[in-house]
Image: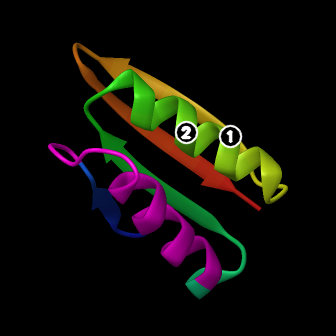
Amino acid sequence: MGEIKDARGLLCPEPVLITKREMDRTGSGTLQVLVDNAAARENIIRLAKSQKWSVSFEQDGEEFLLTLNK
């Protein structure tokens, strides 16, 4: 698996913009994004679904590791 994009400490819309930029750059495959708030998690999930990417996440305390696949 590739690099994990670390968007911890960033407020929306920055985590979403980082994720969208990577989705556009890669086009398909697997992308992982690390965030530390539920709002960023939900917004990235919404973005992924709107772009036809599947998405899952793991939670570790206050952090979420989102895995997007297309």
Taking the view exactly as shown, the residue that stands out farthest to the bottom is 25
Could you tell me residue 63's position as x and y percent? 26, 27
Q: Is residue 34 left or right of residue 39?
A: left
Could you tell me residue 58's position as x and y percent? 44, 25
**What's under tag 2, amino acid-wise?**
Asn
Q: Quadrant of residue 56?
A: top right
Could you tell me residue 38's position as x and y percent? 40, 23
Taking the view exactly as shown, the residue that stands out farthest to the top is 61
Q: Which residue is labeled 2 in the image?
A: 43
**Label 1: element kind:** helix
x 72%, y 74%: residue:
28
Q: Is residue 12 left or right of residue 47?
A: left
**Label 2: element kind:** helix
**What's under tag 1, amino acid-wise?**
Arg
Task: Decide: is 48 above or below 19.
Answer: above
Q: Is residue 62 left or right of residue 3?
A: left
- Mark 2 and 1 residues: CB-CB less than 8 Å, in contact? yes
x 47%, y 55%: residue:
16
Residue 46, label in figure: 1
Residue 56 seen in this snapshot: yes
Residue stretch in magenta: 8-24
Residue 31 part of the magenta-drawn span: no
